Structure formats: structure tokens, C-alpha cells
Image (cartoon, rainbow, N blue to C red):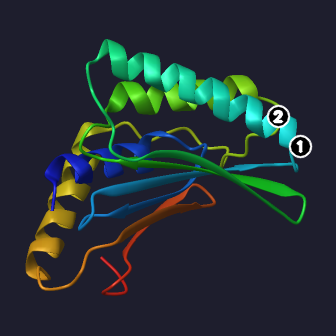
């Protein structure tokens, strides 16, 4: 398990109310960030965001001299909503990339980006406590394959280890 990956998982889960779901497979170090849009966007808008997102992320990676192993953006339309998923390996992702992603989402989908309407939790002591509890739980269950899942429910942050059924 990558402690940096766990740190990124926690920061993304706690700091950004726009993010609907965060999944972290700590065996493969894959991070999936999902946001919900309050309408079905068309193919042209989808392609425009993917192109712009790739260009911006490539420039950031060039400036930071990093080479992502996994980088993908996918859209799914469902019942009047659109779900955007951002796939990244945690080996080369950092806070700058997450901030850039959120900025791009806010700019492009300002009129339909759904969030829980709450302010983000930024208390460092809270994050440290959650991280410590997660590491303790994961170390106690080291024989289980690892897949962390976080989502927001009416402003409340919920986290689970998919393989053990809880944290």
C-alpha cells in the first residue's frame, strides 16, 4: 500500500464537495474520481472537455516533469445526469493536478456541477486522525485485497473498505 496514495485519497475525499465518489484501489494504486453533472451533456461538450483536460494535464505533467502511467477521462449519461470519471495512478498524481482538475470542472460545468452544498472540511487534525485510523485498520487487515471507497451523503463523508465492508 502506498501511503502517498492514501494521503491523496483522504485529501480528495475531504476537501472537495464537488466530488461525488472517490475510489482507491491500493493494490494497483489506481485512483478514480467521479463527479456528477445535473444534466446530460452532449457529445461535443464531452469531447471539448476531454481535449482541454488532456492538454492542461499534459502541460502540468511537462512542467512538473512527471509521466503518468494511467490517465483517462470517461463520461456516462444516466437518467438526465452525466457522470464524469477521472482515472489516475497515484504514483505521479499530486495536489496541483487535483486542483487543476477541480478548476477545469468548475469552469466548464459551473451551471451543472453538483456538490453537497457544504463547505469542505479543512481541519488538519481531522485529516490526520482519519489517516491514522485508516492506516491502523488497513495494517490490521493486511491480508485482504485493498479497495477504498468514499462518498458524500448530505454533507457527511462516508468511507469504506470494499473488501471488509467497513472501516
**What residue does disc 1 label?**
42
Residue 128 location (% of width, % of height)? 19, 48
Visible residue check, residue 161: yes
Whether residue 5 sits left or right of residue 105 in the image: it is left
How far apart marks 1 and 2 lie (CA) works out to: 5 Å
Q: Residues within 10 Å of mark 2 (few under 14, many from 20)?
A: few
At a point 45% along the width and 63% down the height, the residue shown is 150
At a point 83% along the width and 56% down the height, the residue shown is 81
Residue nearest the viewer, comparing 145 with 116: 145
Residue 72 location (% of width, % of height)? 52, 46
Q: Residues within 10 Å of mark 1 (few under 14, many from 20)?
A: few
Whether residue 65 sits left or right of residue 114 in the image: it is left
Residue nearest the viewer, comparing 117 with 103: 103
**What residue does disc 2 label?**
45
At a point 25% along the width and 57% down the height, the residue shown is 130
Residue nearest the viewer, comparing 58 with 83: 58
Amino acid at each position: 500500500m502506498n501511503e502517498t496514495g492514501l494521503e491523496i485519497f483522504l485529501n480528495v475525499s475531504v476537501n472537495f464537495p464537488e466530488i461525488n465518489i472517490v475510489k482507491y484501489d491500493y493494490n494497483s494504486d489506481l485512483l478514480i474520481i467521479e463527479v456528477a453533472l445535473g444534466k446530460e451533456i452532449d457529445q461535443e461538450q464531452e469531447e471539448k472537455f476531454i481535449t482541454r483536460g488532456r492538454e492542461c494535464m499534459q502541460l502540468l505533467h511537462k512542467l512538473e516533469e512527471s509521466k503518468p502511467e494511467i490517465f483517462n477521462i470517461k463520461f456516462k449519461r444516466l437518467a438526465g445526469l452525466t457522470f464524469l470519471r477521472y482515472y489516475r495512478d497515484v504514483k505521479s498524481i499530486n495536489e496541483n493536478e487535483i486542483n487543476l482538475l477541480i478548476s477545469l470542472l468548475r469552469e466548464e460545468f459551473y451551471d451543472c456541477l453538483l456538490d453537497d452544498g457544504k463547505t469542505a472540511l479543512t481541519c488538519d487534525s481531522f485529516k490526520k486522525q482519519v489517516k491514522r485510523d485508516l492506516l491502523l485498520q488497513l495494517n490490521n487487515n493486511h491480508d485482504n485485497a485493498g479497495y477504498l471507497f468514499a462518498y458524500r451523503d448530505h454533507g457527511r463523508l462516508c468511507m469504506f473498505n470494499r473488501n471488509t465492508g467497513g472501516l
